[in-house]
Image (tube, grey):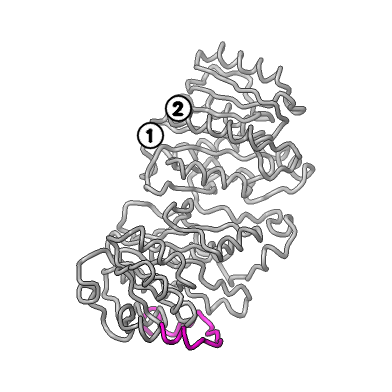
Amino acid sequence: MRPGEDIRSYRLRRGRTSQGALADRDRLWPRYGVDARYPLDPVAVFGRRAPLVVEIGFGMGESTAAMAGAQPEVDVVACEVHEAGVIALLRRLEAAGLTNVRLVEDDAVMLLREAIAPASLAEVRIFFPDPWPKARHLKRRLVSPAFAGLLADRLGPAGRVHLATDWAPYAEHALAALGTALDTRVVARPVGRPVTRFERQGLAANRPSYDVVAVQREGHLRRSSPSPPSGRMVAHPDPSDLTPHERHPMNESIRQNTTFPSGKGTGHGYLALPEGGTGPGVIVIQEWWGLTDHIADIADRLAREGFVALAPDLFGGKVAHDADEAGKLMTELPVDEAAKDLGGAVDFLLGHEAVTSDKVGAIGFCMGGGFVLQLAAQQGDKIGAAVPFYGVGPAVPQSYAGVTAAVQGHYGEKDDFYPAADAKKQAEQISSESGAPVEFFYYDAGHAFHNDENLLGTYSADDATLAFSRAVSFLKANLS
């Protein structure tokens, strides 16, 4: 069997098509349509030599037309099996006067296997494929090891696959399946990928989107995907049907996407890379809740600012959903082992091909803020900037003599966990014992004012925005 053969990842939807729509299809297809059964000659089809992109499953063509208009230097072959979507995109292309898109109304595997030459593609886009969530349907998922092999054969040396999904288990599945033939990673949502009506509906239903990028193994970015899961893939239910605890139960982290050497052998975490591929390194240290969506979102936001952001998972995949669980996890965490994990994360970033800085920054929240200060004290010159947000907990060091990094703190005047008076004494101690530059900001807010999940009821949007803006500027100034 050839790679990709016998994969059928879609279910045809039949509906009534108006005579006007059929007339538009018949009129526009000769201009924009191509046949997937025969080898494609891009120069003959597009009348030029240009980077060639294949988009699989374009839906109603909203993002296809927008991206083609924004990238006139790229030629796109867009594939869809549903007639309504094909007609919608034909109309969009005509209305926008676009000449760099051609349509295929056929199976994507046939297109890649029969029409696309090996090593000819700059990119394959797969935006929001059917996740086939039920266990009995897993074999129908488009992305599989066999399909990954076909993609690797068709991509050029610098080519990539860009997959977007709002189904977290499918993102995990894609990382593992694509990782059998390509180097994979999760990235912050690229600015150039439009938010479609479908994606907005997912966001409204509390389903965030995940962007997975896969490149040829001989490329410049190292693999950061987890190993393929052993045994049978188990389908997950619709997250919108679950409670927060059911969505992320204890001992389950959907956010881990990389590993690194640590004190106990192997550490796990969430790595976010900037769209440009390289940038200064920053460690993001979790609160007592664990490696939550909020912490991963902070890493993504830093990636959008140009940083390579790594959030180590100090709880080994456990996520708490109330203060009792969180307190138990924090109390049971061996501080020395966690410090070794964080030290391994620092070394991992400093050795990472995507990191351009010779020092890394550290930003952390609550318990993580305490670990930021400990990391700065223990790692010395490896840390160029330390940003604790209301840093408390068992990791707060007794001595700051080893700190060489500039320190910027963010604390609440109404913090019941760590009063502002104590924070001011802490700032004075850091300055006097280390001699490093120290600046603390105080806000008319309570503890955890930056956490927009608002688990303590203290989130302050304006203060959070201001504090994060200050932190980003501080990191850029000290890690450039």
Classify 238 as above or below 23.
above
Q: Residues within 10 Å of mark 2 (few under 14, many from 20)?
A: many
Q: Residue at x 47, y 44 (%)?
A: 303
The total number of labels drawn is 2
**Disc 1: which residue:** 357
In the image, which residues are magenta?
A: 1-24
Q: How far is mark 1 from mark 2, CA to CA?
A: 9 Å
Query: Who comes first in sequence, dot 1 or dot 2?
Result: 1
Task: Please name whichever residue, 11 or 74, is drawn nearer the observer in this view of the structure.
Answer: 74
Where in the figure is residue 199, as x and y percent of width and height? 55, 62
Secondary structure of residue under mark 2: strand
Q: Residue at x 29, y 67 (%)?
A: 75
Task: Please name whichever residue, 139 or 36, is drawn nearer the observer in this view of the structure.
Answer: 36
**Disc 2: which residue:** 384
Where in the figure is residue 343, as x and y percent of width and height? 51, 35
Name the image quarter holding the C terminus.
top left
Q: Residue at x 43, y 31 (%)?
A: 476
Task: Please name whichever residue, 254 or 39, is drawn nearer the observer in this view of the structure.
Answer: 39
- Looking at the image, the residue that sits furthest to the top is 432
Where in the figure is residue 281, as x and y percent of width and height? 44, 38
In reply to whether residue 16 is colored magenta, the answer given is yes
Question: Could you tell whether 48 is left or right of 311 in the image?
Answer: left
Residue 108 quadrant: bottom left
Task: Please name whichever residue, 329 or 322, is drawn nearer the observer in this view of the structure.
Answer: 322
| Residue kind at label 2, given as amino acid type | Gly
| Residue kind at label 1, given as amino acid type | Ser
Name the image quarter holding the N terminus.
bottom left
